[in-house]
Image (cartoon, grey):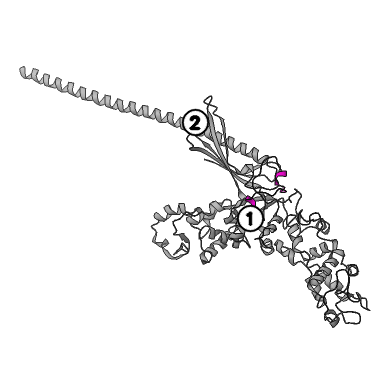
Amino acid sequence: MRFTKRFSYIFYKEQRGLSLVSTLWILTILSILAAQLLYSIHIEQRTQRNFLDRAKFHYAARAGFEWTLAVMRTDQTPFDSLGETWAEPIEGQVDDGVQVGNFLNYQVTITDEASKVNINTADGGLISNLLAQVGASPDEPLTQELANNIVEGQPYRTVRDLARVEGMTSEILYGTQQMAAFTQGATNTQSAPIGTVDGLSTTAGGSLQATQTEAQPGLVDLATIYSLDASTDPNGEALVNINTADAEQLTQIETQPGQGGGQPVFSQAEAESLIQQREFDRFAALMDVQAVSDELFNNIRNQITTEDSGGNGDDGETNNSQENGPPRQGGGQGPQQGEDGQVNINTADVETLQSLQGIDEGIAQRIVEHRDSQGFFQNIDAIQDVKMLTQQEFIGIVDKITLEDGETRSGLININTAPAGILALLPGMDSQKAQAIVERREQDPPDDAPVQNYTDEEITGNPFTNISELSDLQEINFETFREVVDSVTYRSHGYRIEANGVDAAGKVISTCIGIIDRTGDQVVVQYWRQD
């Protein structure tokens, strides 16, 4: 009996101990669950606040984007330069909308897409120069191969699509800052460098791998697919396509102000002669156009001579009487027509030359001017050496003509916004010429500069108002001008707008990026991304 009582007492104490332990465990578990619940509630509240903040700052960024669109719509200047209001970063505020009395900040930057190289229109030479700009050696065979692969892959939907081009590397596409992590993580022995050329190593896979450590821009920084310009002249009139225009349209082309402005360039016969010779792929080809086309020459060859009366005009030789030098303009030193009625192109004046079928005053004047400056024609075939345009006329019409139909032109580089490094890549250009362009547009404008007449806003610098003004630079001779003129413009209609919603500490919370096209009556958003 006594043993039983003792056993019961011990059992009772053990039960109480187990109950206490169980209670403590339950309290511990409940405490953990309560802490977890509180933490979850805190995380949920913080997530909601973050979501609310992101939503608010997203709309702040959108507000900045829409405000910038309004700014771009009011830009009415016929040129686009870094000296205009739109080129300055825009900062503003909008009402919080949730917290009364609070304001949300936004910051906006605008980039002219025409300050970059368009990979959808650039040829192999320009692409090679661009690759050199991002660190590839222009003399390296793999660089030229990569350039050819890029051209063959045109068109691209985004610049980042270049990643699929054979031979493309991360450092070339994204720059050396991204390359550092790429190089450190590379363990594939098949990609080990097998040679180095100008800071780039070639790999067994036939690609280029940058080895330099200094910061280098990539193609994503210097290339675009959105550069765009309207097919209009500085006065807003449609450009004349010299490859398709009829004679009447060609005769209406006049030179730019400052380049003999207001003067028609082509006479009726000159326009018809140009039509017989055209299929131009570059503006420079205009300088090789003959005033007397092959067809016109064949029509008049039996009617012209280079000899005085009594000579044989068909043997292509000149007699000794023509060695005394060129005749006076508008008159000759001998008979203007032979006994058989042939016209002596070495002595005939403008009026006599017009008696030939197909030659009007315009062509006749060019024949006489050529003869006065170059001397007598040695044979009748030499009349085809007479060119249609002078250098000054060519310079004066490049802002009035085009080689393609359509309301827009893609791929032109804006000389008012492109950095010197991009300008130096263009045909005929180098760093000295590019720097001369930058210095011209940044210098104080002369008192008679027309740029302030286009708008009420204050424009800094001295931007180009047309392409012809390039020829005014001492560093840009005519050979350079004719080489580069196909590649440049003085304005842009495609822009990249990046709008950020930023908090009070200046931290970017939300970003909106859009590419706009303003060639038409309405601004069109061609590309949109929000982060």
- The residue furthest front is 447
Residue 65 sits in quarter: top right
- Give the magenta part as a residue range: 436-453
Residue drawn at 54 percent across, 62 percent down: 146
The label number, if any, that marks residue 52 in the structure image: 2
Query: Taking 164 as reference, is 503 above or below it?
Result: above
Which amino acid is tagged 1? Ile
Seen at 64% across and 39% down, the residue is 71
Residue 55 in the image, given as x and y percentages of width and height: 52, 33
Front residue of this view, candidates 447 and 208: 447
Residue at position x 90%, y 67% in the image: 351
**Disc nearer the start of the sequence (2/1):** 2
Residue name at image x 55 percent, y 27 percent: 97
Badge 1 density bin: few <14, some 14–19, many ≥20, Cα 10 Å: many
Near-viewer residue (192 or 270)? 270
Q: Which sits in the foreground, 141 or 94?
A: 94
Q: Position of residue 391 (x, y in %)?
A: 74, 63
Q: Dot 1 lies on which element?
A: helix
Q: Quadrant of residue 84?
A: top right
Q: Which residue is mark 1?
A: 437
Can the viewer see residue 226 in this picture? no
Give the vertical position of 106 relative to 149 (above or below): above
Amino acid type, mark 2: Leu
Q: Nearer the viewer, residue 3 or 518?
A: 518
Is 3 magenta? The answer is: no
Q: Quadrant of residue 337?
A: bottom right
Visible residue check, residue 290: yes
